[in-house]
Amino acid sequence: MIPLIKPVPLDGTAHACGTLIAGDDPATSVVDEAGRVHGLQGLYVVDGSVLPRSSRVNPSLTIYAWALRVADKLIETQGVGQ
């Protein structure tokens, strides 16, 4: 049988991170600490693009934690469930 997948060495792995810089200054960043996109009301980023870089491990749990944090901040600011 011919394998349908090809092993990828550790130095060949990648996750898309760091494409949307987080920060306080809209001139040098895309989103703030709550995941809000500067200059656009109601637009939030909850994926791995706000992570500055990816380590050698899969960033899925970090991305989940970021998404939950943004959701918690939305609940706080919108008064949902109170």
Image (spheres, rainbow, N blue to C red):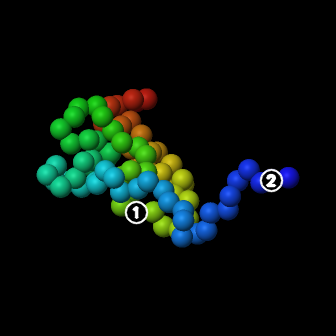
51 lies above or below 34: below
**Circle 1 Cα neighbour tier, 10 Å, few/some/many (<14 / 14–19 / ≥20):** some
Residue 30 in percent (x, y) is at 24, 48
Q: How far apart are marks 1 and 2 (CA)?
A: 35 Å
Dividing the picture into quadrants, the one containing residue 52 is bottom left
The residue lying toward the viewer, choosing from 19 and 62, is 19
Toward the right, the furthest residue is 1
Residue 22 in percent (x, y) is at 28, 54
Q: What label does residue 2 carry, if any? A: 2
Secondary structure of the residue carrying tag 2 is: loop
- Which residue lies under the disc numbered 1? 53
Q: What label does residue 75 carry, if any? A: none
Q: Residue at x 21, y 42 (%)?
A: 38
Q: Residue at x 22, y 53 (%)?
A: 29
Q: Please, what is the three-letter code of the amino acid marked with disc 1?
A: Arg
Toward the front, the furthest residue is 2
Dividing the picture into quadrants, the one containing residue 23 is bottom left
Give the left or right position of residue 21, taking residue 71 as reference.
left
Query: In the image, which is nearer the foreground, mark 1 or mark 2?
Result: 2
Q: Which residue is drawn at 54% across and 65% down?
A: 12
Q: Which residue is drawn at 67% across and 62% down?
A: 7
Q: Please, what is the three-letter code of the amino acid marked with disc 2?
A: Ile
